[in-house]
Amino acid sequence: MPPVARNVAKFPPSPPGPIIDVSVTSGTRHYTLLNTNEPPEDSELTFIRSVVSETSMRLAGLDDEISNLREKLEQLEDQRATLSSYRTQNMAIVSPLRRMPLEVLADIFSWTLPSLHDACSFGGPDVAQSPWLLTQISSRWRALALSTPSLWTRVVIDYTCASAPVMAVVEAQIHLAKKLNIHFYGHPKTESGPQLQMFELLTKHSLRWEELCIGITSEMVPLLTAFRDRIPSLKRFWVQWEDSHTAVQSLDCFQTAPSLVDFGINHEEHHFVPITVPVQQLTRYQLTGSWRRHLTILKLAQNLVEAHIEIDFNDEELEPPKAGLINLPHLRRLFVSHSEVLDNLELHGLEGLALWVHEEQADDIVHHFESFFSHSECPLRRLCLRGSDAHATAQILGKIPSVAELALAVNETHSQGDFDLFMSTLSSSEIAPQLHSLFFASEAGSIIDDYTAYLKMLRTRWEADGSALKNAALLAVAEGSGPDLDTLGGLHALRLEGLDLLILEGSAASKEMFNWLYSSSWIL
């Protein structure tokens, strides 16, 4: 057994030195010389010099004692550090962590994985981050991490970052994983050779893909054609076009994906290349495209549970489908970027609806809601309005008494006065008294800088007789645009009283807001 501590040197006790009385009697000549600038007489110098000599000797003795004590203190501190380290090592032996079941420890490991946003900022797998970091702690942790395939499932490659991914690290991670969730973001301004080599490496393992989120460049398109009949496990697929220079008119390699249930595409301003997928088996889709493109999907996707419908008009008029209303019996959650879409849908099972209210369409939104509910008797419980004003919101809530959760987002079109009017309107106990959840977001570009009215509204609804309010959220998407300290103090007081209140700012607020809009949580 290792020694518990080394011996401490023994110091002989120092003989006590003489105690020097430093008090001087008032009225004496010595007292006068100590307290004035009067020069001493020659006859007085001998006495003064003897006092100085005596005190100097005593000071030297005290210095020796202090030095000895300091040396002894250092040795005692060394001994304590050694004992403390030894005790910590022995306590680790009986620590619950050492006896923790491996499956529990593996679950804890999964919570250390970086977010998708953080993983993208690294450019590729980083050995200084989890899960690689877990292999560097101890042999037990290393063995467990390397034998837990789920820790290595998500592979993130982002060529829009300055750091280039290391091929060998990516290969090692693929080897350790059982299933693969691939997030690959190409960049048209980055050298294409390394990107194509990396993507080819990933495609060799497409049989294990369950998730593919990809930013496509024109050079990558030919590689996609090899996917046909080689993605049997792919469940979720999201694609974004990173440039417009491609001669490909359509892609049908995903049409034969037997497990695909979640599909999304965003072409932004780039050329839109149609991608055919097995629409009949989709339970979720998210698309930015023309209304005709959406119609093609909606008419066939009878198994949809959630849809995010964002329309890019491109000077195209929104026309009702020729076949009449589209009935989607299983749809539970829906986002639409234009309220006209509601006129064309029959949704008897809809529970959550999110709607982008454009300024020029604000006057028509109530009409579209009336039209929708005239042919859709649905148990709507959750409503999210992005860009609505106070008047329209009050009218809509008056027509949907079943709504218990309300989420509102204001943008650059709302002034501080509009916001205050919104809060004043919602303060009325006559407006949706059944609400138990009330969420509010201020988007990037919003000029709202005073949240006093928000605090007052929450306080009023919280204290109202028979109040149903239980949950609230305040999101400020722009960094530094949240409430001031006084308002935060008032909101914290509501927390202490029992209100479940979420306050977020910046990227975390943005991610939470887009969850309200049923935008996919597994993409950026």
Image: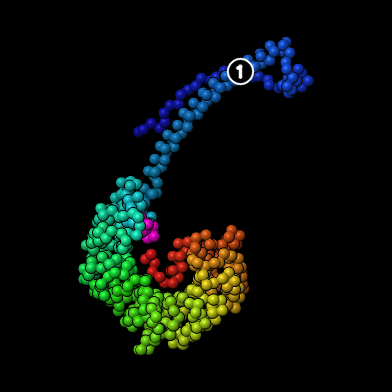
* 504 left or right, relative to 346: right
For the C terminus, give its image quadrant: bottom left
The percent coordinates of residue 47 (x first, y second) are 69, 13
Q: Quick check: 383 above or below 21? A: below
* 261 left or right, relative to 6: left
Q: Residue at left 26%, top 57%? A: 194
Q: Quick check: 166 above or below 355? A: above
Q: SS at mark 1?
A: helix
Region of the chain picked out in magenta, as a range:
115-122
The percent coordinates of residue 198 (x first, y second) are 25, 59
Q: Quick check: 492 above or below 23? A: below
Q: Residue at left 61%, top 60%? A: 486
The percent coordinates of residue 516 (x first, y second) are 45, 70
* Residue marked by disc 1: 56
* 378 left or right, relative to 481: left
Dominant secondary structure (helix, strand or loop) of the stretch shown in magenta: helix
Q: Residue at left 37%, top 74%? A: 288
Instruction: Specify the quadrant of the image occupied by residue 87.
Output: top left
